[in-house]
Amino acid sequence: MYLGWAALLELVLVSTLNGVLYGMLLFLMASGLTLIFSMMGVLNFAHASFYMLGAFFGFQISQFTGFWPGLVLAPLLAGVIGALIERYGLRNVHRHGHVAELLFTFGLAFVIEEVVQIIWGKLPLDYRIPPSLDFSAFTIFSTNYPAYKMFMLLFAIGIFVALLLVLTRTRIGLIIQASLTHPHMVGMLGHNVQRIFMLVFGLGCALAAVAGVIAGPALVTQSNMAALLGPILFVVVVIGGLGSLSGAFVASLLIGLLQTFAVAVNLSTADAFGWFGIHTNPLPFLSDIWFVTVAQIGPIMPYLLLVLILIFRPTGLMGTRDT
Amino acid sequence: MSEGAQTASMGRSASGILATALRYAAWVVLAALVLTLPKMFTSSFAFTLLSLMGISIIFALSYNMLLGQTGMLSFGHAVYYGLGGFIVVHAMNTITKNSLPIPLPLMPLVGGVAGLFFGIVFGSVSTRRGGTAFAMISLGLGELVASSALILRSFFGGEEGITTNRTKLLRIFDWSFGPQTQVYYLIAIWCFICVLAMYALTRTPLGRMCNAVRDNFERAEFVGYNPQFVRFLAFSLSGFFAGIAGGLAAINFEIVNSSYVGAEQSGTVLLAAYIGGVGFFSGPIIGAILVTWLQVMLSDITEVWQLYFGLLFVGMVMFAPFGISGLLMMHAPLWHARVLWRLVPAYLLALAAGLVMLTGVSLLIEMAHHLSTKTSEGPMMSFMHVPFSVHSFLPWLVAAVLVIGGYFFFRLTWPHVEGAWHTALMKAREHGSAA
Amino acid sequence: MSAIELSGVTKNFGRTEIIRGVDLSVRVGERHAMIGPNGAGKSTLFNLISGRLRPTAGAIRLRGEEITGLRPYEINRRGLSRSFQVTNIFPRLSVWENVRCAVLWSMGYKYSFWHNIDSLADVSERTELILRQINLLDRRHFPAGVLTYAEQRALEIGITVGGGAEFILLDEPTAGMSRAEAEHAVALIRKLSEGRTLLIIEHDMSVVFNLADRISVLVYGKIIASDEPAKIKSSRAVQEAYLGTAA
């Protein structure tokens, strides 16, 4: 298929914007996940569940007060719940080892999904974009780019800047940085490491919830949100390298862009072979693969990338720590 | 109660010749039991349930080859189960279409070979990492295969899946395998073979090195073994047995669809193995039986049985990480010293208090569920055959009292349990069965 | 040809030089001790020889064959076995199983999943022999994790020699032991290393001078002396760096 240059440029620009946005959302979650993993050694399987809780809390609050209070309250609520879970749940499991911790968060994810289904049901919720942002920010050729999406992008970047400032410029941020690599030493220096763990866990969950609050209106708010996004999130951190924040950043953007572009491109294997003059399927029993389009592979691209990384660079793009 | 003591006493009791003879006898008794169960439970429901349990046992044991024996936590084990099932239905359909002289009882082996094949292929990439990374990789691979189900439609059959007919294959002894009783015997015999085989595997050099790699990956390297290769072998072999389970499931249900390879199936086998206890060979067997039974029974009693499952799992991770088999084996030294009866009064008290608390929790959950999802049906509901209105204050008060009061009394019983354990343990030490 | 030979071995961690050009030669059949102050890099050297770490530069040879950069199991299969300063056993396996795991590869059973291990008489015999030598035979059914510290150190040695390695590396085997336990350990080590090549890291000077045929002194990543015990004792450089002079 031959696109005109303008249409091609439009496709590229819009997809880049969308891809970066998706990548930013992923990183919003992956950063919290990596912080928790780096400090406590446990990969929070329920991380995507807090993303979901953010969306649902945001929806529920917006039913009473509109979108904006929800933006602040929902992550706060999710963060508090996360901190409580760390204090009364995870901390007790810690002594049984990392496998038990991972299984605990796995069970937690399961329970959270069931509870959300009980309270809100299984159907998608009508979580609306706030009217103040419901217009088109600008137009790229023939596509209207929604202002809300620009808001999402800018808000996510704002959160990162704030996080970076807190981590590097405040006292508590420095203590957190130290606890990331030397929790024992920090404890010896008189800081309450247990409380820092609780704080970081709550912070990580709050970050995931923020992603949920802002993504909820744009994407679908439904009880299977966590199950859909969870695997992609974990694949992102493995590809980036477990424990590496910069790796998570690169991997998030990479997968965000890859998936977005894949969906936009409507090439099939047959088309690709056609470029080389091959018009009939040489392997008829693999006809599924012959007709599959890049768009259809979009959802599984992260996993294909995972396999590639495992073959060529098993510790991840910027992997530092092996578990 | 030290792990060392219980293993020590087990070791001492297992080293006698009498014990060895007893172990062989145990297998014979097991075989007899499996064959005569149908005589004891004759309803068709029982056959269905037993068939499901048989499949689940093989699957859960294959999972424990990874988790309990080699220390590899996988979130995507259903891939090998499901792909085994898919290959078997395709094979069965091909055999039927071409009238090949291959009888049904051999089909699970086809599933096993398929599971082995995919275990080798996927294992070569996924066993490059261990620990948390491996767990996430298994999750990713599971999603990869499950998502591919909608792309590779001719193999996976799209949303409907692939169906087959198990009665159309070559008949031996005039068995059509139409009736569930005959399917039960097929599953039961394969289950017995697989359990025996997997147990035997634990008594081989590879089986022992799997445990060594689990305990100390690095040290295994310094005694001459490539620990990554050990993991790879364990992974491939566990895929083999998972494939057999999948093949039996394909035969049992006569349909295979993408849910066979999905995350939910992977989660269920993890639950079953863990609840049963990953530290003992019998653990996953217990877990498989229990979880299958719960899945079938609970779903009739309450709509939110999945929540109960999840809570049970979280509870076990927090308070009983060694599973049911771990809990049972903990009492082994006391059993040997014949002082187990000392625990009974304290246990009964704790159990009663715990049940009160759990009843309250369950009441709360059911009422919350009714309130939020069944508003169209009105406020009336019943709990344990007692009808009441969700809108009235009394049931909520009762629930609160049960939960808080029950928890309060439950905590009160703990010192009694501890005291009973203390005395019993002292007696056991005198007897010599505890360290 | 020497048993173990290091030529110009260097190891950097980032920009920090830990091993700075080490040349060492251990003769076949000798008992060679390595001493030096804490932080000199002795354990790092062991890690380099046994394959746990890769040298930044230089070559390591075992019986003339280059083993630089090989994986630990490849080096172990060539006849070199090492113990660890921090006890590195299989905690949930029984004492018997710990030693048996060390025995398996050298007896040729490799990754077999078709042999019933309990019926392998040669494996059982050798395991029993080793356990008898390290005096843990009557504790054989206990999980290794519940043993006392000294018992675990003995087990550590048992795992190291279980495979019948020709070249044995022991990293501070008597650390944390009482005088009596250390004497016992030395007798055990002397017996187990008969006819083999032993390289041992030690801080206990009585053990060193009791056991060693030759001693090498490692200070700040360099070997400052490598000679017979008497010459080492009287060397000024060694006294200044490590031993100290008589008060």
Image (cartoon, rainbow, N blue to C red):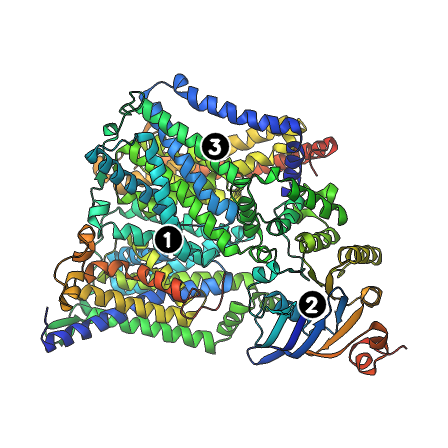
Residue under circle 1?
A: B121
Number of on-image labels: 3
Q: Residues within 10 Å of mark 2 (few under 14, many from 20)?
A: many
User: On the rendered structure, is A228 left or right of B223?
Assistant: left
| Amino acid of disc 3 | Leu
Where's residue C167, x and y in %? 69, 62
Marks 1 and 2 share the same chain: no
What chain letter is assigned to the residue under label 3? B
Where's residue C180, x and y in %? 84, 55
In which image quadrant can residue A207 be found? Answer: bottom left
Sequence-first disc among 3 and 1? 1
| Amino acid of disc 2 | Ala
Q: Are marks 2 and 3 in contact (CB under 8 Å)?
A: no
Q: Is residue A11 above or below residue B292?
A: below
Q: Is residue B106 above or below residue B223?
A: above
Determine whether the residue tagged by mark 1 lies in a helix, strand or loop. helix
Q: Residues within 10 Å of mark 3 (few under 14, many from 20)?
A: some
Front-most of B142 and C2? C2
In which image quadrant can residue B331 be found? Answer: top right
Residue C3's tag is 2
Q: Closer to the observer: label 1 or label 2?
A: 2
User: On the rendered structure, is B286 left or right of A109?
Assistant: right
User: On the rendered structure, is A161 left or right of B274?
Assistant: left
Q: Are marks 3 and 1 in contact (CB under 8 Å)?
A: no
* Residue at horizontal 55 percent and vertical 52 percent from the top: B213
Q: CA distance from mark 3 to mark 1?
A: 48 Å
Q: Is residue C215 visible?
A: yes
Q: CA distance from mark 2 to mark 3?
A: 69 Å
* Residue at horizontal 61 percent and vertical 32 percent from the top: B332
Residue B355's tag is 3
